[in-house]
Amino acid sequence: MDLKQIQYFIALFEDGSVTRAAKRLNIVQPALSMQISKIEAELGQALFERGPHGMTPTDAARQMYRLYTPIMRDIEHARVQLSRQDVIVTGRVSLGMVASETESVLAESLAKFNALFPQVEVSVADGFSAQLIDGVEAGRLDAAIINKPRGRLTLDMQPLLVEEMVYVTGMKCVATLPETIDLSQPPAVELVLPTRRNGFF
């Protein structure tokens, strides 16, 4: 059975008359009768008893109507939703972000997202890159914005931006530094650096 045949069956079941059902479907009566006969042949049992007062559904027809009507209703609902220009997006998104990004872009980004998708609930967790990777792998987070990991990940990864790191000293520092610093050979000064869990080094 295809969807068109099921539509023909439902129309005949509800109208109880080949004439009325054919008019409702905008087809000729022989075409409707032929499709109903094909369904009956496929199922191996009669769906209607032909009588002087119209078409009387059998027990098999009543069962078929009960089973297929919700399916056809769902299909029609899906068609209407997909054809709409203003489909409402709903759901929940769990996102992880390193602390530096939550402080710089989170508030503005969430405001823009909420304006576009007000029915979507967003939860954000901050933490170290290693923790956020574990959260995505375990399914606690849908996605995470992290520092570039040192090793390869089994997760899908998309670069978003390149950040510049700068060397900051106190006012009394007299050390002369080059324009760029090779951290594999750091300058002879004490440095305060993120831990390995941060993901930078």
Image (cartoon, rainbow, N blue to C red):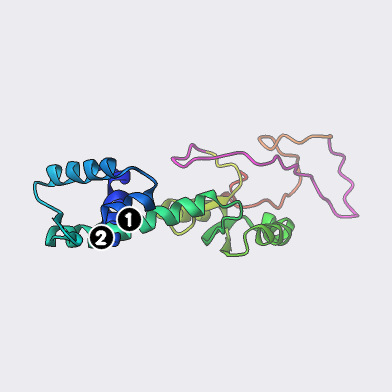
Kind of residue sitting beneath label 1: Arg
User: Which residue occupies the foreground of this view, 179 or 90?
Assistant: 90
Q: Please, which residue is most extreme toward the left here? A: 44
Judged left or right of residue 137, residue 85 is: right
Task: State the mark number for residue 20.
Answer: 1
Residue 13 percent across, percent down from the top left? 25, 59
> Is residue 176 covered in magenta?
yes
Q: Quadrant of the C terminus?
A: top right
Judged left or right of residue 166, residue 132 is: left
- Between the C-alphas of marks 1 and 2, the distance is 8 Å
Residue 135 percent across, percent down from the top left? 47, 56
Residue 122 percent across, percent down from the top left? 57, 63
Q: Quadrant of the N terminus?
A: top left
Dominant secondary-structure state across the stretch colored magenta: loop
> Is residue 122 covered in magenta?
no
Q: Which residue is mark 2?
A: 16
The answer to which quarter of the image holds residue 98 is: bottom right
Span colored in magenta: 151-178
Kind of residue sitting beneath label 2: Gly
Residue positioned 16% across, 59% down in the render: 52
The answer to which quarter of the image holds residue 96 is: bottom right
User: Which residue occupies the foreground of this view, 92 or 49?
Assistant: 49
Judged left or right of residue 116, residue 93 is: left
Residue 62 percent across, percent down from the top left? 18, 62
**CB of mark 1 within 8 Å of CB of mark 2?**
yes
